[in-house]
Image (tube, rainbow, N blue to C red):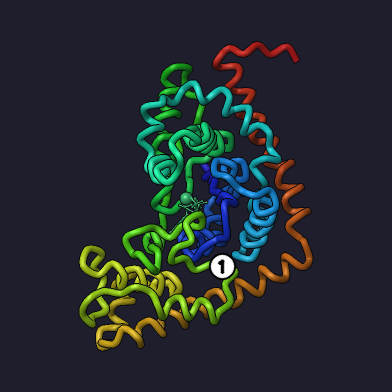
């Protein structure tokens, strides 16, 4: 059977090089692997406080970045999560099949809530994986391309699917998280033991940064003791992260990237090569993004995408409603 693919990005902040190397860069290939549903997870962005105008602008940016990355609207369906009300409807059903114990063990919840006042953690942040499971389930997705940090949520979706199917009989498709071999976890440039995240601006490279700023950020990235350019996540997390970034931009394996710097014993020279690689990769991408923002072509794509997505999603919702015993009098 042909694959169904689903992936999303939440408009919580400015997109980073992590989002690009973990997912965006691979979209042209991903959309050829099957029928793909690519979305802007705007309801998820409300799980942390955000200004309405920022949410709007971030959503537009993600749409434009998807298209700039090579998403072809004739192949893939691009839509806003909030335009397909079926996500919220299925959420109301599925929240009863995931347990509070499971949700409280999610790393993302623990990370994000630990930085907040414990008395004002929104229910949505806690229940986030239920909605994410619905995003996946609605499109019968068997493949979910994500960065490493999202794998845990896809695993939880698998638990939910198995639980539901055991209770009501084979209904939902079991999804699988698929990560890139190189680039699934880009780390912060200022703290290479921490993931680069758009909602935590320390050590980020933003996709909207100008090339000069990007160069400056890479040249001042934290490195490690010694002078060898070697991949060693434990002892050389800074150099390993830069090697990963280089390899990913140049479409190399880590081993191939390492080999290119065997004779290099100056971190400065190495960083310059990494900066060149990132700028070469992002320059044409940024130009395409700018054109798309100016011609606003994303608006029509999102409109058409929502119509297509809703058809597929509604069919799944009807199936689920029937199984759980919700009366249909239409
Ligand atoms: P937030 O801080 O709001 O969680 P984020 O940068 O983690 O932002 P998400 O919207 O949560 O971005 O994730 C979008 C996609 O990008 C997911 O597939 C996620 O796994 C991937 N991703 C996020 N950060 C990285 C990273 N540092 N390296 C590789 N992939 C990443
Ligand atoms: Mg994240």
* Residue at left offset 75%, top offset 47%: 304
Q: Is residue 255 left or right of residue 117?
A: left
Neighbour tally class for label 1: few under 14, some 14-19, many 20 plus, Cα within 10 Å? many
Question: What percent of the width, then of the height, locates residue 30?
Answer: 52, 56
Q: Quadrant of residue 13 in the image? A: bottom right
Quadrant of the frame with the C terminus: top right
Which quadrant of the view contains residue 107? top left
- Number of labels in the image equals 1
Tell me, yes or no, if residue 176 can be seen here.
Answer: no
Kindly identify the residue that appears in the image at 37 percent across and 30 percent down.
102
The image shows residue 128 at horizontal and vertical percentages of 50, 37
| Residue drawn at 52 percent across, 40 percent down | 141
Q: Position of residue 200 (x, y in %)?
A: 47, 56
271 sits left or right of 295 in the view: left
The residue that mark 1 highlights is 207
Instruction: State the residue in front, 246 or 222.
Output: 222
Please determine whether, in this image, residue 263 is positioned above or below residue 49.
Answer: below
Res 69 visible: yes
| Front in this rendered view, residue 273 or 50 | 50
Helix, strand or loop under label 1 = loop
């Amino acid at each position: 059977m042909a694959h169904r693919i689903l992936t999303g990005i939440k408009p919580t902040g400015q997109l980073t090089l992590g989002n690009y190397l973990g997912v965006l860069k691979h979209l042209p290939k991903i959309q050829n692997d099957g029928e793909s549903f690519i979305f802007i997870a705007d309801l998820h962005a409300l799980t942390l406080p955000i200004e309405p105008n920022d949410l709007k602008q971030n959503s537009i940016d993600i749409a434009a970045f998807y298209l700039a990355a090579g998403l072809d609207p004739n192949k893939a369906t691009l839509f806003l999560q909030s335009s397909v009300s079926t996500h919220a409807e299925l959420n109301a059903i599925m929240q009863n099949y995931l347990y509070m114990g499971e949700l409280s063990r999610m790393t993302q919840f623990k990370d994000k809530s630990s930085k907040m006042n414990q008395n004002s953690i929104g229910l949505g942040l806690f229940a986030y994986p239920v909605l994410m499971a619905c995003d996946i389930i609605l499109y019968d997705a068997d493949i979910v391309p994500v960065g490493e940090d999202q794998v845990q949520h896809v695993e939880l979706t698998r638990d939910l699917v198995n639980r539901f199917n055991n209770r009501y009989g084979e209904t939902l498709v079991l999804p699988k998280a698929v990560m890139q071999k190189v680039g699934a976890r880009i780390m912060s440039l200022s703290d290479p033991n921490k993931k680069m995240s758009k909602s935590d601006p320390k050590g980020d490279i933003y996709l909207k940064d100008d090339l000069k700023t990007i160069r400056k950020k890479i040249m001042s990235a934290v490195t490690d003791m010694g002078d060898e350019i070697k991949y060693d996540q434990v002892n050389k997390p800074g150099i390993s992260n830069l090697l990963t970034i280089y390899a990913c931009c140049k479409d190399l394996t880590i081993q191939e990237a390492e080999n290119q710097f065997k004779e290099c014993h100056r971190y400065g020279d190495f960083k310059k090569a990494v900066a060149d690689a990132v700028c070469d990769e992002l320059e044409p991408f940024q130009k395409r993004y700018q054109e798309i923002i100016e011609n606003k072509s994303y608006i029509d794509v999102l409109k058409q995408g929502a119509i297509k997505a809703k058809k597929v999603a509604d069919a799944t919702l009807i199936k689920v409603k029937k199984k759980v015993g919700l009366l249909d009098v239409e």
